[in-house]
């Protein structure tokens, strides 16, 4: 008996798939195929009713005609019926209140051809098939976007920090603040004298003289015959400091007459050089005005009795037969040349007729005449020569240290009778040489020397700094844009969640009211609308 009742109850319940409920009703002819034909007329009635009899409740007043459906119109009618004299009728059965009558006519128009059921089924299907899934996808997309924005922000911050560190390191390497890149780079060569002064200070700490003396002792002990002075440029820098090229030339050749500009600048800087120890403090005591006229225009030069005469008054287009520049070198008697008598540095003599007396001058003499105020360490060739001598000392001290540390020797300097330097002193000397080399070859001084010699290098450095600054500005702007996108994604996420929550609530209410309305066309059977995996 109980099973029979249960079977009867189950027969009274019809399960309907919510996503296809409208198709199910049409296929079983529970709804007429022309159920939508009254829809335009109903829309017109709603437009007229809103103008004459607007909704009473405030929550309905903000809705437009397109937002109203059968259920909302039914709620509005109930509001008018609940109002004073809203439910009174005439003798003919119509409502005496015109507003109530208009909304009553709308409800009757909806019920014709079951338009209200078809319209609600369509609205329900739209919600569960499209609106709810789209809002869920929007929420998922917003969450993914926020996660991507966070990761991207970390990458941009990392890149920005790296660019800032690179810019800071580049500024530190050059010794600039980075406020005005080009102006600060242009004035960097003025700091060269200070850098060279530090090098000269290390040369004058007392160890360099001992190092050179130790090196000379070893050279003499090996019975090696040397024609030239050992480490001539290093000796000159130790004795005289970082003097100018003109001062150096005057030391090499006492008969040398420096240019007038060099003499005046030297006299002005005498007191400064004496206080800093970077100059030689040479008193030239030379009268530059020579009252004896000198015939500068040399017409003929006799190279040898077998050589032909070269007339310098002829045009430069004349061709010398079987002669090259190497054959035009004059053989100079070293005993009569003061510049070559000095053993401070081997000097190559090249034919140059630009001297005052027409005699050939050395390459160092040409440099001293062209740029007399340049210092020794400021000249690339002399600076490299000084570094070569330092590397020579460094290699010698490394070998000497290794031989002193070796437990047994087959042959080495230790077998020589030299006891002036022990292992600890040798290590100290090596440390001094390494420090001087580092001071002349560090990153900053290389840049400053290149800046001094090349304007294009300045442009290239400025361009590199500009690129680093551009990368920082670019990453900063990208972070700002990313923050704007994050705010938009957060707004979209919050808005979508609110809409989904409201839509879910409205759809659940629509489901329960639609199930009651379906009983009218299902012959009294109860409808169960199934909507799995939607809410």
Image (cartoon, rainbow, N blue to C red):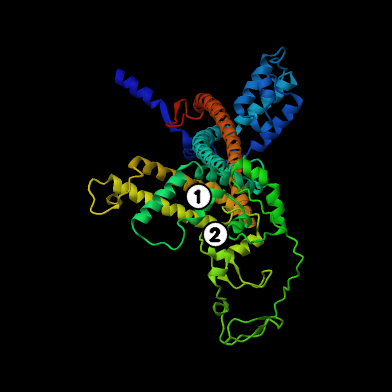
| 203 sits to left or right of 69 | left
Front residue of 496/195: it is: 195
Front residue of 170/274: it is: 274
Residue receiving disc 1: 441
Q: Is residue 205 above or below residue 62?
A: below
Secondary structure at badge 2 equals helix
| 209 sits to left or right of 481 | left
Q: Is residue 334 above or below residue 177?
A: below
Tell me the distance, in whole angstroms, between the alpha carbons under discs 1 and 2. 14 Å
Disc 1 and disc 2 in contact, CB within 8 angstroms: no
Residue receiving disc 2: 381
Crowd band around label 2 with a 10 angstrom C-alpha radius: few (<14), some (14–19), many (20+):
few
Upstream in the sequence, badge 1 or badge 2? Answer: 2
Q: Which corner quadrant of the image does residue 250 belong to?
A: bottom right
Front residue of 107/513: it is: 513
**Residue 421: x, y in percent?**
36, 44
**Residue 83: x, y in percent?**
70, 14
Of tags 1 and 2, which is closer to the observer? 2
Report whether residue 30 is seen. no
**Residue 373: x, y in percent?**
65, 54
**Residue 67: x, y in percent?**
64, 31
Report whether residue 77 is seen. yes
Q: Which corner quadrant of the image does residue 473 belong to?
A: top right
Secondary structure at badge 1 equals helix
Total marks drawn?
2
């Amino acid at each position: 008996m109980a099973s029979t009742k249960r079977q009867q109850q189950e027969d009274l319940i019809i399960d309907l798939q919510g996503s296809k409920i409208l198709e199910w009703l049409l296929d079983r002819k529970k709804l007429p195929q022309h159920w939508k034909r009254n829809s335009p007329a109903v829309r017109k009635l709603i437009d007229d009713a809103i103008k004459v009899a607007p909704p009473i409740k405030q929550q309905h007043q903000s809705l437009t005609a397109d937002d109203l459906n059968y259920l909302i119109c039914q709620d509005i009618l109930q509001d008018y019926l609940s109002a004073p004299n809203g439910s009174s009728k005439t003798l003919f059965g119509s409502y005496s209140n015109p507003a109530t009558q208009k909304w009553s006519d709308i409800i009757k128009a909806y019920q014709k051809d079951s338009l209200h059921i078809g319209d609600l089924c369509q609205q329900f299907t739209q919600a569960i098939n499209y609106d709810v899934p789209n809002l869920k996808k929007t929420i998922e997309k917003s969450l993914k976007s926020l996660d991507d924005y966070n990761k991207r922000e970390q990458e941009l911050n990392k890149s920005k920090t790296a660019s800032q560190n690179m810019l800071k390191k580049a500024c530190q390497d050059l010794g600039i603040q980075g406020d005005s890149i080009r102006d600060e780079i242009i004035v960097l060569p003025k700091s060269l004298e200070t850098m060279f002064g530090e090098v000269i200070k290390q040369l004058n700490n007392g160890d360099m003289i001992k190092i050179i003396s130790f090196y000379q002792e070893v050279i003499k002990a090996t019975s090696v015959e040397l024609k030239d002075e050992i480490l001539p440029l290093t000796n000159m820098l130790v004795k005289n400091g970082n003097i100018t090229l003109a001062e150096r030339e005057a030391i090499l050749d006492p008969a040398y007459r420096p240019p007038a500009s060099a003499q005046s600048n030297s006299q002005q800087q005498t007191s400064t050089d004496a206080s800093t120890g970077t100059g030689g403090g040479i008193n030239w005591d030379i009268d530059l005005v020579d009252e004896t006229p000198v015939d500068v225009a040399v017409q003929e030069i006799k190279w040898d009795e077998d050589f032909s005469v070269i007339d310098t008054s002829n045009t430069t287009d004349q061709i010398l037969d079987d002669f090259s520049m190497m054959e035009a070198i004059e053989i100079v008697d070293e005993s009569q040349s003061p510049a070559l008598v000095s053993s401070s540095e081997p000097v190559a003599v090249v034919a140059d007729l630009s001297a005052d007396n027409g005699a050939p001058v050395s390459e160092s003499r040409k440099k001293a005449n062209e740029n007399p105020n340049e210092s020794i360490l400021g000249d690339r060739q002399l600076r490299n020569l000084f570094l070569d001598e330092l590397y020579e000392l460094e290699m010698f001290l490394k070998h000497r240290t290794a031989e002193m540390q070796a437990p047994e020797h087959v042959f080495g300097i230790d077998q020589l009778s030299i006891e002036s330097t022990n292992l600890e002193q040798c290590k100290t000397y090596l440390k001094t040489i390494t420090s001087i080399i580092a001071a002349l070859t560090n990153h900053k001084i290389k840049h400053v020397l290149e800046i001094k010699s090349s304007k294009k290098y300045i442009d290239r450095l400025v361009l590199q700094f500009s690129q680093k600054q551009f990368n920082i500005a670019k990453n900063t702007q990208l972070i700002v844009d990313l923050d704007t996108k994050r705010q938009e994604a957060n707004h979209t996420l919050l808005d979508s969640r609110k809409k989904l929550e409201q839509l879910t609530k409205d759809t659940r209410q629509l489901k329960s009211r639609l199930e009651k309305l379906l009983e009218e066309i299902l012959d009294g059977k109860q409808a169960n609308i199934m909507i799995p995996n939607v809410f």
